Image (cartoon, rainbow, N blue to C red):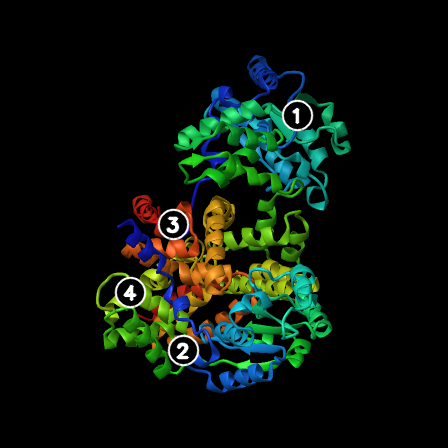
Amino acid sequence: MPFLHAAWTVKHKPKSTVEIIGNPSAIKTLCDWLQSWNKGIPKKRAAFLYGPPGVGKTVSVEVLAHDLGMELVEKNASDYRTEDAIKRFAGLASQYASLFGGKRIILLDELDGLMGNADKGGVKAIINIIKTARSPVVLIANNAYDPRFRTLRSYCLLIDFKKPNSSSIAKRLHHICTREGILADEDALKFLAQRSGGDVRSAVIDLQALAQGKKNLTYNDVSWLAYRDRQESIFNVLKMIIYGRTSYGAKQAVNMTDVDIDMLFEWIYENVPEHFTDPHDLVQAMDALSMADVYRGKIRASQDWSFTRYVIDYMSAGVAMARQNSKVQGWIPFKFPSRIMMLSRSKAQRALRKSIGLKIRRKCHISAARASAEVMPYLRIIFKNDVHNAAGIAKWLDLDEEMIEYIVGNKAKAGQITAFLH
Amino acid sequence: MLHRKEYRVLSFEMWAEKYRPKQLEDMVDQKTIVERLTSFVKARNVPHCIFAGPPGTGKTTAALCLARDLYGEGYREHLMELNASDERGINVVRETIKTFARSRSIGEIPFKILILDEADNMTSDAQQALRRTMERYTETCRFIMCANYSGKIIEPIQSRCAPFRFAFLPRVEHDNYIKHIAKCENVQLLPDGLEAIFEVSGGDLRRGINTLQGAASTNKPVDAKLVYSVTGKASPSDVQKMLITAISGDFSGARKQLRDMLQKYGVAGVDVIRQIHKEIFKAEIPELLKMKLLTITGEIDYRLVEGSDEEVQLSALLARLVEAGYEMKKLS
């Protein structure tokens, strides 16, 4: 069964202004302006908050509304913003107060999305709202200096939100970890904070993807993120593949990332099970990955890289088209390929295994790989049962103490065996 | 005391090696092959050869015996053993193999022997490069390529080699060999124990001997129960447990178990699928579903050989089992 989780960006949303990272003066300006409405309508009836994504623009408005006891009425990119839709909304703004007697804040979020035919006349309608507003109107966009907003700007109090520094983001991440009962390395959090580039939201999303369900978070757990594509995060690519509706779209997603094909394969392979809940869909998706792997095998055997296109077809379009009945409830985070983590953790062990395999090969005329797969299990049994016999075989194979311990899996027993050797 | 200990310690080795035939005439089976190889020794000439057949049927042994019969006890100096799964790249062909192949042999036989084990694991590039080397240095070096599937060796090489097909040992030969070892090593081997060894080894003599040695190390009489417990431990897999996890609907859990088997315990993918195949037959599921799963197992076994990642292939099979479990729940 898949585990459903609440997004940490929601769960750990700041509840008061002190919890918001950075931008104290911007928040103060906004607060003062909102309070000035108590003394009558100010000169600027709208505030225009702008700044890069994930720095706390929306959350500042939400928190202040709560603190000042104001009702928040919100429209964002998911709503249509044709002139008509906004005019209907404008009615609310022209009234003095909400039903409960308190003031209202009219919030128009994600204005950057305002464009094209669907939002035709939108800017003009917004200006009309502002002109007649009897409640504070707050506009939010990434870039207030977009030419489309030129006329709009003169009606607004412009408030600039800047990227918070990474050490305060790290502090916030630490706070979240504490609340989630996760013991996190300072290095790991610093790394996450730095690579977020000031985007607190993405840092929290990354943190959840990596740390959820764990007791500890180490630098090793996060350092692989350095490989992550800078332009289009792997999570977006995964979303486009695993939830792709067209085979073409899913295939295109592969081109959007710098992650190499094998690594992307691992990401998809790791995340397919929890996102394909219907057993028939799961079969189709896994079958597509199996076919992709068959072509990888062909490439390896023939060194003919032209087969790569089929690997891509199967792992992207093949997986996307597997979705027939699976419905996803809630937010399931994408997870880092655990296989890769396991591989890097067991590196030393595998090296030891290989060297034992090579020792066996010298005597038994089989490859090191088959030696460790076929002979080692029997060695383990013999070593466990018969110390004396084990010592003889260890000598014959020229195994050292570390190897003996690996085979027998028990330090005390390994000691007994080596005692026989000296 | 110390001396005795030392002496006893030195006398141990893996029985599969201790009882590996030393000369062609010691070989218990593959009679027609042995006859032809013996005739090569008599003629003091050996063509390039392909030894094809399943594991544990005596391919490497035959090659080593041939060399020993040909060169005598100092055969090691005229022989090179390479394993393509360990060194499969083209560089091995370019460097190691070429250097060995072109240097002249000292002694009465003008050529050396190169045994290339698991040759079907070579990339086709490396095989192409090998083809020229084989031709050019025929005077100084003869190749014996051992492979499970001769089909994976490229045509031009096949056409340059004398093919030999090794089959699994017949039951009688297998049993005689195991009994012989048991007698020499003072192991009390019971009839049902012998039966069980054949059942788990499936005619793979190396596996059979290893199983015997593992069971004997308990110092108990070797019966069927002991053999099964030893082989169960040899693949701590617990394939059955994994299948139950899958059929109950927990794909991720089953995949985790599979991963542990492959990565932590180093169980070979082919062994896992072999056991899955067995378990499906035994399982209490509707006959029609059983047939469906067996068909898929065959398909995945094929992909396992063709593909590059055992876990990916086997987990595709696990997904099928999850689906089967789901269908069964719907039926009941």
Answer yes or no: do the residues labelled 3 and 1 have beta carbons within 8 Å? no
Q: Identify which residue is drawn at 76% across, 29% down.
A: A150
The kind of residue tagged 4 is: Ala
Q: CA distance from mark 1 to mark 2?
A: 67 Å
User: Mark 2 = which residue?
Assistant: B291
- Is A277 located above or below residue B305 in the figure? above
Mark 1 — residue?
Answer: A48
Pointers 1 and 2 within a single chain: no
Q: Counting other residues with Cα less than 10 Å from the Cα at mark 1, is it few (<14), some (14-19), or many (20 or more)?
A: many
Of mark 3 and mark 1, the one earlier in the sequence is: 1
Mark 3: amino acid: Ile
Percent x, y for residue B42? 56, 84
* The label number, if any, that marks residue A404 in the structure image: 3
Comparing marks 4 and 1, which lies closer to the viewer?
4
* Same subunit, tags 4 and 2: yes
CB contact under 8 Å: marks 3 and 2:
no
Cα distance between the residues tagged 3 and 2:
44 Å
Task: List x then y, in percent, for residue B300.
Answer: 49, 70
In this rendering, do the residues under marks 3 and 1 share a single chain? yes
Does B197 sit left or right of A59 as displayed? left
Q: CA distance from mark 3 to mark 4?
A: 20 Å
Residue B329 visible in rendering = no
**Dot 4, crowdedness within 10 Å: few (<14), some or many (≥20)?**
many
Q: Residues within 10 Å of mark 2 (few under 14, many from 20)?
A: few
Subunit bearing disc 3: A
What SS does tag 2 mark? Answer: helix
